[in-house]
Image (cartoon, helix red, strand yellow):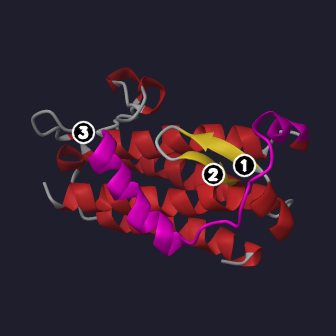
Amino acid sequence: MHTSDLPKFLADEATAFAQFVAPLTEAQFAHQPAARWSVGDTAQHLYLSARPVMRVLSSPREIFVQWGDAEGPSRSYEILTKLYPRVLQTTGIKAPASFSPRPEDVPADKTTMLTRLTDIYRALADQLTAFSDGELDRYQMPHPALGMLSVREMILFMGVHTRHHIAVLQAY
C-alpha cells in the first residue's frame, strides 16, 4: 500500500468500527459478557494500542535508532492478516496491561469513546504525511506479539487489529 493510501486506510478502519458500534444502545455498548471485554472496553483497547504508535510517529526520527533498520521489505496487509491470528493461537499472548482497558478510564458514553478512537486514527494519518515511502519501510518499532514491524506494517497492523476485534465482537 502506497504512503498516500495509508491516511484513508486508517480513516476507513475507524469508520468500520464506528459503523459496527452505531446501532448499539449505550447499554449494549457497555455490556460486559462473562470474562470478555465490552464493546466499550474494546474501543478503549484499540485507542490504548494506537497511543504508543502515535507517540513514536510524532517523535524525532532519532527514536527509531534504538530499534535499527528493518531487515527486509514490509509485509502486506494480507500477510499480516494471516500472521496475526496464527501468532495469537500459537502463543496464547494477551494484551499487555498497558493496552487493557480499566473501568475508570473508559468513557461513560459511546460517542465520547468513538470520538477518541477516531481522533487518534486521524492524528496517526496526519503524522504519516511527514514520512516518505522509504522511511515507512526502513524504520521499525516493536509490537508486543509480532516483534519488530516496519512503520508501514504497524499502520497496516492497526487495520488488522481493528478488524480482528470487530470479528471477535460479532461472535458474541
Q: Farthest residue in the front direction?
A: 71
Residue span colored magenta: 62-91
Task: Identify the disc placed on residue 3.
Answer: none
Task: Identify the disc placed on residue 37.
Answer: 3
The x, y position of residue 145, in whole percent, is 46, 42
Front-most of residues 22 and 1: 1
Could you tell me which residue is drawn at 75 percent across and 76 percent down?
Answer: 4
Spatial distance from mark 1 to mark 2, Cα to Cα?
Answer: 5 Å
The x, y position of residue 89, in whole percent, is 27, 49
Spatial distance from mark 2 to mark 3, Cα to Cα?
Answer: 26 Å
Quarter of the image with the C terminus is bottom left
**Looking at the image, do the residues carrying marks 1 and 2 touch, with CB atoms under 8 Å apart?**
yes
Could you tell me which residue is drawn at 76 percent across and 62 percent down?
Answer: 137
Task: Identify the disc placed on residue 149.
Answer: 2
Q: Does 118 sit left or right of 73 as displayed?
A: left
Q: Secondary structure at mark 1?
A: strand
Residue located beneath label 1 in the image: 140
Amino acid carrying mark 3 in the image: Trp
Front-most of residues 15 and 131: 131
Which secondary structure class fits the magenta region best?
helix
